[in-house]
Image: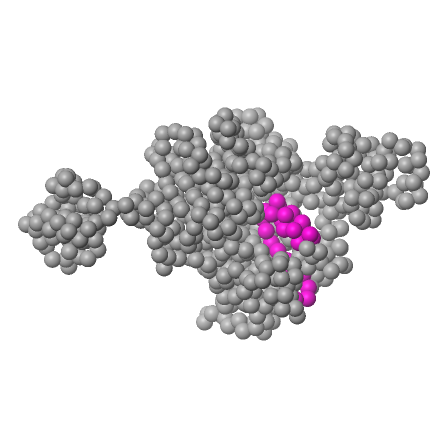
């Protein structure tokens, strides 16, 4: 077995691992089920890629993000590491070809979307893969109590019964203690006998599950300054921040419309900006993303569809123009700033009206069963699916056209679809991307004669054969844009020529699929017969309310260290104050000499000794002193039990503290 340090140097060029990476890798190599909680940019992928390369066999990587799978596969192939991916929306033929190649090659990594795990086709090829590790990315998706629950993740535990003895590495950037415990429970296979597991894996006392090794990086980001501003004009504040802080920036917005509006306003101020959201075609998304990564665009104004899997270390500022609905999302998105260790800024903008709307969001996010049934019936009618059919079928789904035809609210519809997905009725994916594929369907002799008879099509044939190795023998993904660039033609001309070759029977050309998809997980039933697990549904609703409250608390906090608030939320309670967030800087500015402190302390004790005094009255009595300084002394005296504040906000120093 090659040493992990040699693998790191050979393929990644690094001389040393980042904190915790080596410990996690050794845990995996020892055969332990391992949970790694590593903040955004912490180098999670190396934690499964290195041990997988150190062992014989294939690492099965389960991920819900198609774009991220695609990027990982491409990056591994650039290092001459064989990797493939299978995800929602691929045709049966494409899946079979990929699985055959994986089983019959030196493949080291197979990326799989969770929906594919329980298909008969996947299970048929699974025994021949010699899987050495199961890596579960975005592992928080398995928990119903997390912020991004995805039911297909629950199938992973069943997969483990097919792969006895294979350890699991669960990876996530942000999970509370409750969610971490849920991940370990859900990913443990209770049906696998203890003797089949490798290494020392003692069961719990009740024998229900096995031991997990848990590693958690600190949530401390000493170079990242968090701040929150309440504003009347967000665009003016954004411009002010971008003018003060040079370098690359991300501006997150809640709506697609706002991304375009803000980017246009920034350009009017001569700030290089572009917008990005999931509604753009894949080619346009790629172009905008590359321009930003290569610093041709300074600011990307985007929805939360942007950023996952992008490793740009020199982002100086992340601005949230709208308040996210949970600290999990905020921490991940803000954490895209300053991965190079240099001072960076995470800024959150809000107004009181927005916080009021956020508190009411649970009603919109969790529609009634009546509303869910209405959307379900409308979807079935829109797609013209007869009752008793549809299971396992994919359908193109134009959301804008759908809500317009059925006169539905687009946001309410989206959340109803989410509820149907979480209860296992259907799967709705807004970001399906299936690249174009080509397979030659003729032999070389016929192809040569065809080129002689059709000289106008010969250049595109030659370009395909040169640019895509093995394309003559098996179906290959291609990029029409790349072919057009090689031919020095426009993309539309290339697409027409490929369609002509398809018509002549020379190739089988399947154009790119780049539209939202609905997958029916059960046959269609009458809308009025649709039922759901309302107990679990209502519990998720309450958990959502709780997360919103924590987000609002963070936003309104004006004294405590913001880094510590975030760390505490995720169970990292030993973090020191950062010293660079807006609240820490404000506290630093409130300096008190010993004389000042003693004078204020004496006046507070004197005013509250005889009888309790309301806080407002106490502050009025200290009107000649800066309010921040008075509060600092009040908080100190309260912490030291020198004064007490009762339930009616009255301060007392003369009554002993019980």
Q: Nearer the viewer, residue 190 or 94?
A: 94
Q: Is residue 363 left or right of residue 408?
A: left
The verdict on residue 75 being magenta is yes
Q: Nearer the viewer, residue 282 or 589?
A: 589
Q: Is residue 437 left or right of residue 316?
A: right
Q: Nearer the viewer, residue 420 or 434?
A: 434
Residue 322: image quadrant is top left
Percent position (x, y) of residue 161?
61, 63
Percent position (x, y) of residue 28?
57, 66
Number of numbered discs visible in the structure rendering = 0
Which residue corresponds to the image point at 75% horizontal and 55% vertical from the top-left?
101
Percent position (x, y) of residue 474?
80, 48
Q: Is residue 549 visible?
A: no
- Vertical relation: 259 (above or below) 183: above
The verdict on residue 194 being magenta is no
Q: Which residues are magenta?
A: 55-78
Q: Is residue 185 left or right of residue 520?
A: left
Which residue corresponds to the image point at 43% horizontal and 50% vertical from the top-left?
223
Q: Which quarter shows the C terminus?
A: bottom left
Which residue corresponds to the image point at 64% horizontal and 53% vertical from the top-left?
111
Percent position (x, y) of residue 138?
53, 52
The figure's colour scheme reads one colour
Q: Is residue 605 visible?
A: yes
Q: Nearer the viewer, residue 629 or 519?
A: 629
Which residue corresponds to the image point at 83% horizontal and 46% vertical from the top-left?
472
Q: Which quarter shows the N terminus?
A: bottom right
């Amino acid at each position: 077995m090659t040493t992990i340090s040699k693998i790191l140097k050979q393929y990644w060029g690094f001389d040393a691992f980042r904190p915790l990476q080596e410990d996690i890798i050794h845990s995996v190599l020892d055969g332990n089920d391992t949970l790694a909680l590593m903040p955004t940019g912490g180098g999670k992928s190396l934690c499964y890629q290195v041990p997988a390369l150190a062992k014989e066999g294939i690492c099965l990587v389960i991920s819900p993000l198609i774009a991220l799978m695609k990027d990982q596969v491409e990056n591994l192939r650039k290092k001459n590491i064989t990797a493939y991916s299978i995800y929602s929306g691929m045709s049966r033929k494409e899946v079979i070809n990929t699985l055959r190649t994986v089983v019959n090659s030196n493949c080291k990594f197979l990326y799989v979307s969770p929906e594919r795990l329980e298909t008969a086709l996947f299970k048929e090829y699974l025994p021949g893969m010699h899987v050495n590790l199961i890596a579960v990315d975005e592992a928080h998706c398995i928990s119903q109590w997390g912020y991004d629950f995805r039911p297909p993740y629950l199938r992973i535990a069943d997969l483990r019964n097919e792969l006895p003895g294979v350890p699991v590495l669960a990876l996530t950037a942000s999970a509370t203690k409750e969610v971490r415990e849920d991940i370990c429970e859900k990913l443990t296979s209770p049906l696998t006998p203890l003797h089949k597991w490798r290494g020392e894996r003692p069961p719990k006392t009740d024998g229900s599950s096995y031991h997990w090794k848990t590693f958690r990086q600190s949530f401390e980001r000493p170079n990242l300054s968090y701040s929150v501003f309440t504003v009347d004009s967000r665009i003016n504040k954004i411009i002010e921040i971008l003018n003060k802080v040079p370098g690359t920036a991300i501006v997150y917005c809640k709506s697609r419309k706002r991304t375009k509006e803000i980017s246009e306003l920034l350009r009017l101020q001569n700030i290089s900006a572009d917008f990005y959201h999931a509604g753009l075609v894949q080619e346009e998304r790629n172009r905008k993303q590359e321009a930003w990564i290569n610093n041709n665009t300074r600011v990307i104004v985007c929805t939360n569809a942007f950023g996952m899997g992008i490793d740009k270390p020199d982002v100086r500022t992340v601005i949230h123009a709208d308040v996210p609905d949970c600290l999990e999302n905020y921490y991940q998105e803000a954490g895209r700033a300053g991965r190079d260790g240099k001072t960076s800024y995470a800024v959150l903008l809000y107004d009181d009206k927005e916080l009021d709307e956020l508190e009411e969001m649970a009603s919109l996010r969790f529609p009634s069963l009546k509303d869910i049934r209405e959307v379900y019936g409308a979807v079935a009618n829109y797609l013209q699916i007869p009752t008793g059919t549809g299971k396992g079928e994919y359908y193109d789904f134009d959301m804008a056209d759908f809500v317009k035809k059925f006169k539905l609210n687009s946001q309410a519809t989206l959340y109803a679809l989410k509820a149907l997905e979480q209860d296992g009725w259907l799967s709705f994916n807004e970001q399906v991307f299936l690249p174009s594929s080509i397979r030659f369907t003729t032999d070389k002799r016929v192809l040569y004669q065809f080129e002689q008879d059709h000289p106008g099509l010969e250049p595109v044939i030659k370009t395909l054969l040169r640019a895509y190795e093995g394309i003559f023998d098996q179906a290959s993904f291609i990029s029409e844009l790349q072919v057009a660039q090689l031919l020095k033609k426009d993309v539309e001309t290339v697409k027409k020529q490929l369609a002509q070759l398809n018509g002549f029977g020379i190739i089988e050309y399947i154009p790119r699929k780049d539209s939202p998809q609905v997958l029916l997980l059960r046959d269609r039933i009458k809308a009025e017969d649709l039922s759901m697990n309302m107990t679990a549904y209502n519990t998720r609703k309450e958990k959502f309310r709780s997360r919103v409250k924590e987000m609002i608390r963070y936003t309104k906090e004006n004294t405590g260290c913001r880094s510590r608030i975030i760390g505490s939320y995720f169970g990292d309670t030993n973090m020191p104050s950062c010293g660079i967030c807006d609240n820490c800087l404000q506290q630093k500015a409130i300096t008190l000499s010993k004389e000042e402190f003693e004078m204020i302390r004496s006046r507070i004790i004197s005013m509250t000794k005889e009888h309790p005094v309301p806080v407002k009255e106490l502050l009025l009595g200290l009107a000649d002193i800066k309010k921040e300084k008075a509060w600092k002394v009040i908080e100190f005296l309260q912490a030291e039990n020198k004064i007490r504040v009762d339930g009616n906000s009255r301060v007392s120093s003369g009554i002993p503290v019980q």
